Amino acid sequence: MGQLCCFPFSRDEEKISKKPIGIQDLINEALHRERMALQSKVKQIKELLLKPETQAKIRRELFEGRSINNSNQGSDVDFSTTLT
């Protein structure tokens, strides 16, 4: 009888029931793990950006950055470049 804990099969039974692992399977597993880790990070960043205190800090820093840039630029603005 197999173990009743976390592993329902003994190691020998598990080896028999699974197909051999190839290099492509290992690559796919590594890519899957990396993708899951990145998705988790993106979720954490989204949650952080949705917090009111984070949004207030971003607005404050953007506003301060604009006022500093506007005071430094003065008449040295170059309008010769155009956006396409």
Image (cartoon, rainbow, N blue to C red):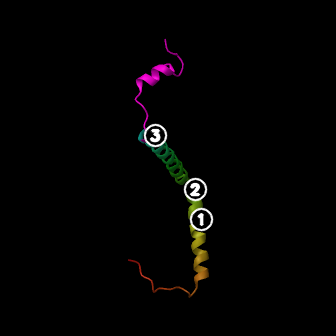
Would you call the spot at circle 3 few (<14 residues within 10 Å), some (14-19), or many (20 or more)? Answer: few
Residue 83 image point, x, y percent: 41, 78
Identify the residue under disc 3.
26
Question: In the picture shown, does residue 32 fall above or below 10?
Answer: below
Q: Residue at x 58, y 56 (%)?
A: 54
* Front disc: 2 or 3: 3
Q: Which mark is residue 54?
A: 2
- The reply to whether discs 2 and 3 touch (Cβ–Cβ < 8 Å) is no
Q: Amino acid at mark 2?
A: Thr
**Nearest to the observer: residue 60 or residue 40:** 40
Q: Residue at x 42, y 31 (%)?
A: 20
**Nearest to the observer: residue 30 or residue 60:** 30
**Nearest to the observer: residue 1 or residue 66:** 1
Helix, strand or loop under label 1: helix
- First-in-chain label (2 vs 3): 3
Question: In the picture shown, does residue 47 fall above or below 7?
Answer: below
Q: CA distance from mark 1 to mark 3?
A: 47 Å
Q: Residue at x 40, y 29 (%)?
A: 19
Identify the residue under disc 1.
60
Query: What secondary structure is the stretch in magenta mostly built from?
Result: loop
Question: In the picture shown, does residue 74 fall above or below 54?
Answer: below
Would you call the spot at circle 2 few (<14 residues within 10 Å), some (14-19), or many (20 or more)? Answer: few
Q: Residue at x 56, y 67 (%)?
A: 62
- First-in-chain label (1 vs 3): 3
Q: Amino acid at mark 3?
A: Leu
* Front disc: 1 or 3: 3
7 part of magenta stretch: yes
Tell me which segment is drawn in magenta. 1-23
Quarter of the view holding residue 57: bottom right
Would you call the spot at circle 1 few (<14 residues within 10 Å), some (14-19), or many (20 or more)? Answer: few
